[in-house]
Amino acid sequence: MKTKGLVKKVNPIEVYDSLDRRSETGPLRPSQLNILSDWFCNRSKNKDNVIKLHTGEGKTLIGLLLLQSKINETGMPCLYVCPNKYLAEQVKQDAKKFGIQYVETSGSRELPEQFLNGEKILITHVQKVFNGLSKFGIGAKSLNVGSIVLDDAHACVDSIRSALTITVNKEHAIYKHFIELFSDDLSLQGEGSFLDIRDGDYNTMLPIPYWCWLDKIDEVTTFLASHKSDDGIKFSWPLLRNMVKNCQAFISGAKLEISPYLLPIEEFGIFHNAKNRILMSATTQEDSLFIKCLGFGVEALSNSLLNPEMKWSGEKMILMPSLIAEELDREAVVDAFAKSVKGRRHGVVFLTSSFATEEQFKQLGSIVAKTDTIAQNIESLKSGHYNSPVVFVNRYDGIDLPDDSCRILIIDSKPYFDTLIDRYEEECRPTSDILNLKLAQKIEQGLGRSVRGEKDYSVIILLGSDLVKYVKSPITQKYFSLQTRKQIQIGLDIVDMISEESNQLNSVSLLNNVIDQAINRDEGWKNYYIENMSLLESESVDNSLYELVKLEYDAEVNYNNGIYDQAIKKMQTLCDSFSGDAQEKSWFQQQLARYKYLNSKAESIKLQRSAYLNNKRLLKPNVMIPYEKLSYMNSNRISRVKHWISNYDCYEDLILSVNHILDDLSFGINSNKFEMALNSVGEMLGYICAMPDKDIKKGPDNLWCGVNDKYIMFECKNEVLETRKDINKHEAAQMNSHCEWFKSEYGEMTKCEKYIVIPTNHLSYHADLPSDVKVVNRTRLSRFKGCIKAFFQELAKYDISQVTDENIQLWLNTHSLSEREIMSIYSTDIKHQNS
């Protein structure tokens, strides 16, 4: 039978009705109808659209229908891009189910004809599209397409950033060359840190100063070009080779990272020049990075397509066990839930931030997913294999665990940024809205792994004082979406409700009773949740952050294009915008100093000095910075302890902060976190504290000053493995150097107790240390932490605002934290090796 003049459907709703779908598929959902209708009637001609829907509202089908509509209308190539292979396979399965014709990339260099001819949608993943050797072409050779969809767009952006970053490990020739080329410059940024990097410390990293990078740009570019075919560089080099001077570099004990300040997204013509660009994300996600990384405008983000009828989706019981009972700390909950249980009727899943705890989970009976087993582990859960809990490491997106595959999701500790640039920004800009939104977004991505639809439900347990403090604190809670903030509040209300039962049951039984209410579908819980979530009201969009990010983006575009006067003007406006936030202002001052360096080195150095003096985590300029000595102020130690306590409104908030600090004061923890925690411990115990190695890039890691100008100095080697037999020559040399530094700054006669925090108290035969240096090992550190916690637990019985000087002095003495005892009983003598 011939059909004459058949007109293809363009309205996506009509497209859906015309598909040869499987019988299991039903009509479009109301939320899908709303989005598709709004797009077709009002947005289909827009170059840029952002679609935001709750998990389970059918974003995938919407994206496929929009592309099919565009194919039917224009006959131009259209592609659907996922953040990874696993999700691309899921989209292909959905396309088959709904009868949508698609093609996929093969192993050859040629793209499918049916895609190029605008006949079928190409479904692929982001790594195939966004790289310097992309078969879709780059620059002027880019393929011209009609429409492109980025599904889970935030994860796609992370992948694009990774594709545009040169990353090589410490064994690579580039790493070895750069660490020598910039050795003096890096040492200036931190003598101790640079020595640790030389020693292979994974967690210690330093930025290569922009002025050194620019001064040596010819040698840098030539050397990179000579290795352009090497792994770690070949996929990014074609995009970065003409903009190396506009890149930043960071080096750690494990790797070197080089990335552009501004992603050259325009080089990917398939995206940049597409007639229609559609980004899809969850309602819980903040979208300002679409401006900074993809060049989207403020208007597209401010007018996202969303379903106004649905303000929340799915049921999440968010619990923080440590708030129910202090003994329900991380170790207790992991021990209770990470065990293999025969006959378990639902999946138990852990999301953890690091492989450091892998062995602990394995010993308890959990399965730790690896890169090559993730798909298999997910399918195993979906197939009903629930006996062994499954642990996913640093996987907060791209994992879907609906229904019984995960009824208990445990997020173990606060996520961390794993790229060196993000770690540097986190250290320099702890109050930054952008970074806090990124962190909150990562946590929310984790929260969404186990609730994948409107009727899905899960108990979500938050572990680790760092994560609990971040989620609970009003300062950081504001960065979460309205839906998540309400779910957190419901969880906090549960804590208040069950506090009366805490004396009748042991804490683990109490926690299990609460969990059972959700899993066994208790009507009282279900109604309580629905009633509270139904109170949510729409939240107005605040464009102020978008405008600031757009200004930063425009400034960097001007700088890249050599329009320096406009770049400087815009960056100065950004500096002025943060007049009340010294850390943020100094961050942008550093960018302004970089902009000025090529035209006026003197003015650049002046700006950099000003930025550094306001924020010692920034780059130290190559000029003399006077060291400000620590000295004890007129206030006594007791008043300083009381002042620290006064920062908290109640005992619960105070002990949460104490636990967070003490958790970070642990062997194996990231050295930066450990040193910050040790600094906080000094302050909470009434000392004046500094971190010379961080602040002035010289001297010990931590320095405390007490009454009568008595000093305590710490060199921290908490990441040294327990298996290490002795303190090596390099570590002893560092300690000796810092002892000499102290003498030169404070004088030969100034009293100073000297400690090295390290697992072993045996000194290598080839090393030497002064006789008055002592060791704080794991046993002594654990005792110290226990006494600190016991001291602050004394406050549980009091109104913390009414605690007297006598109380504090008594408790300091009781818990061996007096001026006479401090540190001396928490250390041990060094044992010298004979041979």
Image (tube, rainbow, N blue to C red):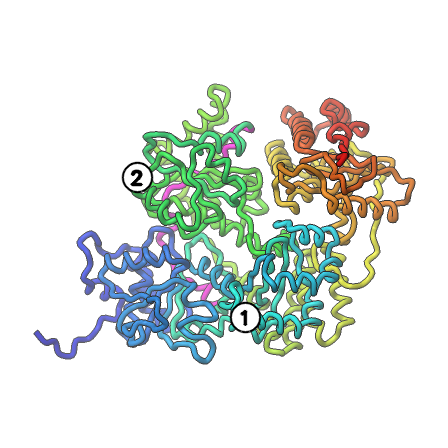
Residue 511 x/y as whole percent = 45, 29
For mark 2, give the secondary structure.
loop
Which corner quadrant holds the N terminus? bottom left
Q: Residue at x 46, y 58 (%)?
A: 154
Residue 509 vertical position relative to residue 262 in the rendered view, above or below: above
Q: From the viewer's perspective, is the residue at label 1 or at label 2 nearer?
A: 1
83 or 452: nearer the eye?
Answer: 83
- The answer to if 302 sits in the magenta stretch is yes
| Circle number at residue 384 | 2
Q: Secondary structure at mark 1?
A: loop
Tell me residue 515's x, y (percent).
40, 32
Where is 478 relative to 135, above or below?
A: above
Residue, disc 1? 228
Q: Quadrant of residue 638?
A: top right
Task: Report how many numbered discs are placed on residues in the image.
Answer: 2
Residue 546, position as x, y percentages in the image: 53, 63
* Res 783 label: none
Density class for disc 2 (Cα within 10 Å; few <14, some 14-19, many ≥20) is some
Using the rendered image of the protein, determine whether residue 65 is visible from the camera's viewpoint. Answer: yes
Span shown in magenta: 299-326
Badge 1, how many Cα within 10 Å: few under 14, some, many 20+? some
Kind of residue sitting beneath label 2: Gly
- Left or right of 656? Residue 640 is right
x 78%, y 40%: residue: 713
- 339 displayed left or right of 687: left
Residue under the image location 40 percent in, 46 percent down: 449
Amino acid type, label 1: Lys
Which is nearer the eye, 301 or 511?
Answer: 511
Task: Report if the CB atoms under discs 1 and 2 are less than 8 Å apart.
Answer: no
